[in-house]
Amino acid sequence: SIPLMKHFKICLWSFLMTFFLTKSVFAEKLNLQLLMIDDTACPYCELWEEEIGYMYFKTEEGKLAPLIRHHYGEKIPEDISLVSDPIVTPTFILLKNNKEKYRIEGYPGEEFFWSFLSEYIQRIKKMENN
């Protein structure tokens, strides 16, 4: 019984390490980031913070596309390439290799945010697999 339990623990540990290392490598391979353009006077930015911001980094999406915050009106770093300048806050821009792939303008609620962000990440994953 003891050798069997020890074998089980070793197998479980090996599986978990492989699972987490694979996820980590896949996240690095995707090279995604979520650029959030916010403003201190933006009530929708505050709402996003209350509903999502505090936990974003703990989510699957947050691990695949870490959040970068940028204040509206400030110059976008030169290594980031956007299709156009953001005109509303909040604006969420999904970057791949520092290039804009998808954009969510405004924040009409957490269900909308999660569904679009998840869909956009899935599209990028599919492109990676083809």
Image (cartoon, helix red, strand yellow):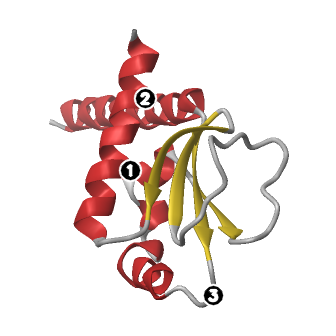
Asked if labels 1 and 3 touch by Cβ distance under 8 angstroms, the answer is no
First-in-chain label (2 vs 3): 3
Disc 3 target residue: 40
Residue 15 place in picture, x, y as percent:
34, 30
Q: Is residue 90 left or right of residue 15?
A: right
Residue 128 place in picture, x, y as percent:
46, 18
Nearer to me, 94 or 8: 94
Nearer to me, 8 or 94: 94
Crowding around mark 1 (Cα neighbors within 10 Å: few <14, some 14 to 19, many 20+) is few
Residue 83 place in picture, x, y as percent:
62, 41
Q: Looking at the image, is 96 positioned above or below residue 116? A: above
**In whole angstroms, how far apart are the C-alphas of marks 2 and 3?**
31 Å
Identify the residue at image location x=37%, y=39%: 120
Disc 2 target residue: 124
**Disc 1 element:** helix
The amino acid type found where label 2 is placed reads Ile
User: Which circle marks residue 60 in the picture?
Assistant: 1
